[in-house]
């Protein structure tokens, strides 16, 4: 199980699921702040009992991960669990945002993530929801994402 949240701010690009979305704000973070990829990375690492994304890719000022494309972190995460003998069975994820609407771009996100991880698109589920204008998401102060990953032990 993985979870991530980032604050929406002006002056940043909005990257979710490995693709750039047109929006008036972007997510604030040490990397490109791709909330969906970060949740997926945490779910993958957690399923392999390998701690979390911050442990493997620490957010320290001036390090190699500052402003990094989260697709690179995802690829490295898949490589890390492969070294431990695991491969991805499937991923189920949810993006929570009022705007922009995610549904028109979900297929593109799935294509991007499948390519990065070297898995079939049918093994990736991405859903989108709002919080009906409730909480920080509803006030459009941030975006969150959840992910659940099934890993397979390679024989």
Image (cartoon, rainbow, N blue to C red):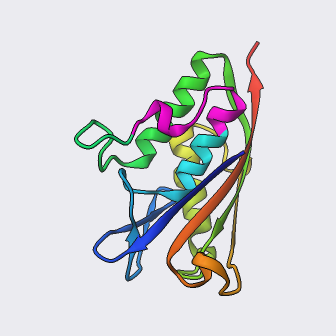
Is residue 87 positioned above or below 112 on the image? Answer: above
Quadrant for the N terminus in the image: top right
Left or right of 43 on screen, residue 26 = left
Is residue 38 depicted above or below 10 in this figure?
above
Q: Name which quarter of the figure residue 97 lies in.
A: bottom right
Q: Position of residue 61 (x, y in %)?
A: 26, 43
Q: Specify the quadrant of the image occupied by residue 48.
A: top right
Q: Position of residue 86 (x, y in %)?
A: 68, 23
The furthest residue to the top: 155
Q: Please give the name of the residue rendered at 28% of the width and 74% of the height, measured from the top-left corner.
A: 11
Span shown in magenta = 44-58
- 44 or 155, which is in the foreground? 44
Q: Quadrant of the C terminus?
A: top right
Measured as percent of width and height from the top left, residue 23 is found at 41, 80
How many numbered marks, from 0 up?
0
Above or below 96: residue 56: above
Is residue 48 one of those drawn in magenta?
yes
* Figure quadrant of residue 46: top right
At 50% from the left and 77% from the top, the residue drawn is 141
The percent position of residue 109, horizontal first and vertical second, equals 56, 60
Q: Residue at x 39, y 57 (%)?
A: 29
Q: Is 55 on the left or on the right of 122, as rendered?
A: left
- The extreme left residue here reads 62
Is residue 32 a member of the stretch shown in magenta?
no
């Amino acid at each position: 199980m993985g979870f991530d949240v980032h604050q929406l701010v002006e002056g940043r690009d909005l990257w979710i699921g490995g693709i750039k979305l047109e929006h008036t704000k972007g997510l604030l973070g040490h990397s490109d702040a791709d909330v969906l990829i970060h949740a997926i990375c945490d779910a993958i690492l957690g399923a392999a009992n390998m701690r979390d994304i911050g442990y493997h890719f620490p957010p320290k000022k001036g390090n190699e991960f500052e402003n990094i494309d989260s697709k690179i972190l995802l690829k490295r995460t898949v490589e890390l669990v492969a070294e431990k003998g695991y491969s991805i069975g499937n991923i189920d994820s949810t993006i929570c945002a009022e705007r922009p609407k995610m549904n028109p771009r979900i297929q593109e996100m799935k294509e991007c993530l499948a390519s990065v991880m070297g898995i079939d698109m049918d093994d990736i589920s991405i859903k989108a929801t709002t919080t009906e204008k409730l909480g920080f998401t509803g006030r459009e102060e941030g975006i969150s994402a959840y992910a659940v990953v099934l890993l397979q032990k390679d024989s």
